[in-house]
Image (cartoon, rainbow, N blue to C red):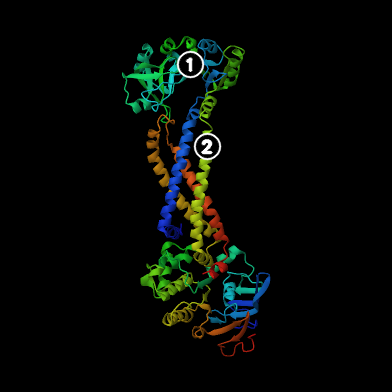
């Protein structure tokens, strides 16, 4: 269940309280996020929409521990990440977050298999165990037969599938998807969204996704709009939830 | 090493650039090794100098002679075991370019003072009995294709009018160590003494004495110089290594020259490899950001960049050393007579490898630290 009023029961997987982010650019302060609250439960699928510069990616970066807020706190599965040191945050990311980027960001000189294996190199798994995990992840995204292909030998949709396999291979607590279909045609975008839905529905993954595309956003359980750093509207409100909670 | 495949994949990402960088590295290392070998050749006399040997020269200079009668007086000084004397002959064999050092020796004592030069007994005994006899080092004999029994004509103009002296090659000497000096040519002092102008008869160019113990060096040197002080032939006594160092300095400050050129080579290599690494890291900003995003630590990012620069340095280093190993004997043969023999020792090969690794580390350090400090959010925004 998703709430944006800060009135969650404290048991949500992700709890954001009073989150603000201000950038300083040329002596000018730009407040990107303003005292946001958010509660996301395990298995939720949240879409964030909003115009460019509204703070969607900033919010995603903060939730993924890639950036630190100016104010407020983020708690994931009981871990308060906003005060973690850089090295602790790096280890936390490896364990809890799977990233899916718009531009796929695969390593071009590694095969699909090697790209997916990368997060597992940070674990203590043996080579055989790593192979098992990688093959499972590639099976989930339907690319087991392309594991020895290099990114340049794959289509955009296939590259994004490899990125998703890389994101899920270490079984992270949640997935952060930044415009996962932004560089794809409609058909490929549909396939990727079907895959993400499968991860949520079949495997119980928690997904937070930023998108510009209302069609894509509509496939999330809940869509939240960010405008000028504030969550202003819930596009898809679950029954009986947060009607008065949206700021 | 779990990241092995990533390191190698990155290394071979731009093959032409890799080949050019490794090639520059290898050529520069050949140059560096060559300089080190030349430096070592000039200092070899210092390295192989006996700790228990002193050299007496005229206080005025190396080319001034001393009476041969000093030998007996020096031998009587406590702490002195053996005394022998040399003269510089300085002749020309066939052509000027065929230079090799020729020494007029005192056969009776030479072998006692220099046990590291090995001459078969039968050849040595023949030499002792033959006033026109000569002994050549194995390298010089090989260079000119001489064999025992050959007649060797050497033209000389240092001692009176130019004339050709003829010697019988009675023996060939070797040295105990493989990098020993096997380039000398020895001739009999008696023969020399009979054929030089009157003013030079009964003289020695310099003396070499072997001590009972290296601990006696200071005391014996002071005693000798005091004894001959205020005489017509004042002396300067020093250890053999100090003498060799002084001799090498006659050619100029070789060490400084080599150090200067070596430093230029070092910094050029740093720039070449550092530039390659900087470009390589800049091209991969987004990839490194992704690695950091998925949990690769800053230290591991630094390690990845350093490992890559080290691999370039190692490939270039090994190739450069192999080239040097093949080229230096050829160069040495080409410059025989102009430079002392050039030998690429195992120590120097190891030094070359250490040098390569050092360049690898230093050149990868700056781009590596840059990658380590890079903010993931900023780097991803650039994509």
Can the viewer see residue A140 in this picture?
Answer: no
Q: Is residue B308 above or below residue B236?
A: below
Quickly name the residue at label 2: B257
Residue B258 image position (x, y, % from top left): 51, 38
Label 1 close to label 2 by CB (< 8 Å): no
- Mark 2, residues whose alpha carbon is within 10 Å: few (<14), some, or many (≥20)? few
A46 or A61: which is nearer to us? A61
- Mark 1, residues whose alpha carbon is within 10 Å: few (<14), some, or many (≥20)? many
Can the viewer see residue A226 in this picture?
Answer: yes
Name the image quarter holding residue A160: bottom left
**Rendered image: mark on residue B85:** 1
B165 or B151: which is nearer to us? B165
Q: How many marks?
A: 2
What element does badge 1 sit on? Answer: strand
Task: Please state the chain letter of the residue tagged with numbered disc 2 in the rendered image.
Answer: B
Respond whether the residues carrying marks 1 and 2 are from the same subunit.
yes
Q: CA distance from mark 1 to mark 2?
A: 33 Å
- Identified at 44% across, 17% down, the residue is B104
Residue B248 image position (x, y, % from top left): 51, 29
Q: Is residue A107 above or below residue B184?
A: below
């Amino acid at each position: 269940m998703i709430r944006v009023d800060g009135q969650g029961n404290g048991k949500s997987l992700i709890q954001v309280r009073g989150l603000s982010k201000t950038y300083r650019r040329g002596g000018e302060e730009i407040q990107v996020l303003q005292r946001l609250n958010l509660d996301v439960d395990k298995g939720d699928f949240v879409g964030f929409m909003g115009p460019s510069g509204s703070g969607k990616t900033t919010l995603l970066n903060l939730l993924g521990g890639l950036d630190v807020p100016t104010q407020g706190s983020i708690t994931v599965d009981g871990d308060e990440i906003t005060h973690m040191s850089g090295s602790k945050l790096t280890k936390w990311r490896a364990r809890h977050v799977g990233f899916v980027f718009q531009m796929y960001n695969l390593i071009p000189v590694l095969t699909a298999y090697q790209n997916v294996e990368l997060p597992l190199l940070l674990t203590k798994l043996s080579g055989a165990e790593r192979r098992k995990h990688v093959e499972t992840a590639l099976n989930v995204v339907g690319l087991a037969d392309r594991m020895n292909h290099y990114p340049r030998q794959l289509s955009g949709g296939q590259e994004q599938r490899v990125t998703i396999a890389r994101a899920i291979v270490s079984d992270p607590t949640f997935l952060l998807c930044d415009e996962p279909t932004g560089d794809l045609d409609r058909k490929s975008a549909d396939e990727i969204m079907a895959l993400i839905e499968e991860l949520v529905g079949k495997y119980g993954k928690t997904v937070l996704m930023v998108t510009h595309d209302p069609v894509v956003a509509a496939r999330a359980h809940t869509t939240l709009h960010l405008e000028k750093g504030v969550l202003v509207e819930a596009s898809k409100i679950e029954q009986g939830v947060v009607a008065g909670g949206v700021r | 090493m779990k990241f092995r495949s990533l390191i190698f994949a990155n290394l071979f990402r731009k093959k032409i650039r890799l080949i050019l960088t490794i090639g520059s590295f290898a050529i520069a290392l050949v140059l560096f090794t060559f300089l080190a070998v030349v430096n070592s050749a000039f200092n070899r006399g210092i390295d192989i100098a006996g700790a228990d040997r002193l050299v007496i020269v005229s206080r005025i200079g190396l080319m001034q002679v001393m009476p041969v009668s000093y030998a007996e007086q020096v031998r009587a000084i406590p702490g002195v075991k053996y005394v022998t004397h040399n003269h510089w002959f300085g002749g020309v064999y066939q052509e000027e370019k065929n230079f090799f050092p020729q020494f007029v020796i005192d056969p009776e004592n030479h072998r006692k003072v220099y046990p590291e030069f090995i001459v078969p007994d039968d050849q040595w005994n023949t030499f002792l009995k033959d006033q026109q006899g000569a002994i050549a080092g194995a390298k010089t004999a090989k260079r000119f294709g001489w064999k025992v029994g050959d007649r060797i004509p050497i033209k000389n103009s240092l001692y009176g009018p130019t004339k050709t002296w003829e010697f019988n090659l009675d023996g060939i000497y070797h040295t105990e160590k493989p990098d020993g000096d096997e380039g000398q040519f020895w001739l009999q002092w008696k023969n020399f003494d009979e054929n030089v102008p009157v003013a030079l008869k009964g003289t020695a160019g310099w003396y070499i004495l072997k001590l009972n113990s290296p601990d006696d060096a200071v005391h014996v040197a002071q005693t000798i110089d005091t004894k001959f002080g205020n005489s017509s032939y004042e002396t300067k006594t020093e250890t053999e290594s100090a003498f060799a160092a002084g001799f090498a300095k006659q050619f100029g400050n070789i060490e400084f020259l080599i150090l200067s050129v070596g430093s230029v080579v070092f910094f050029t290599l740093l720039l070449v490899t550092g530039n390659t690494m900087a470009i390589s890291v800049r091209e991969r900003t987004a990839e490194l950001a992704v690695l950091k995003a998925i949990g690769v630590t800053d230290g591991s990012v630094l390690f990845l960049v350093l490992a890559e620069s080290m691999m370039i340095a190692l490939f270039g280093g090994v190739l450069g050393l192999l080239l040097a190993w093949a080229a230096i004997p050829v160069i040495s043969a080409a410059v025989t007579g102009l430079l002392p023999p050039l030998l690429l020792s195992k120590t120097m090969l190891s030094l070359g490898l250490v040098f390569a690794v050092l360049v690898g580390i230093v050149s990868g350090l700056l781009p590596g630290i840059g990658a380590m400090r890079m903010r993931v959010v900023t780097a991803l925004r650039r994509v």
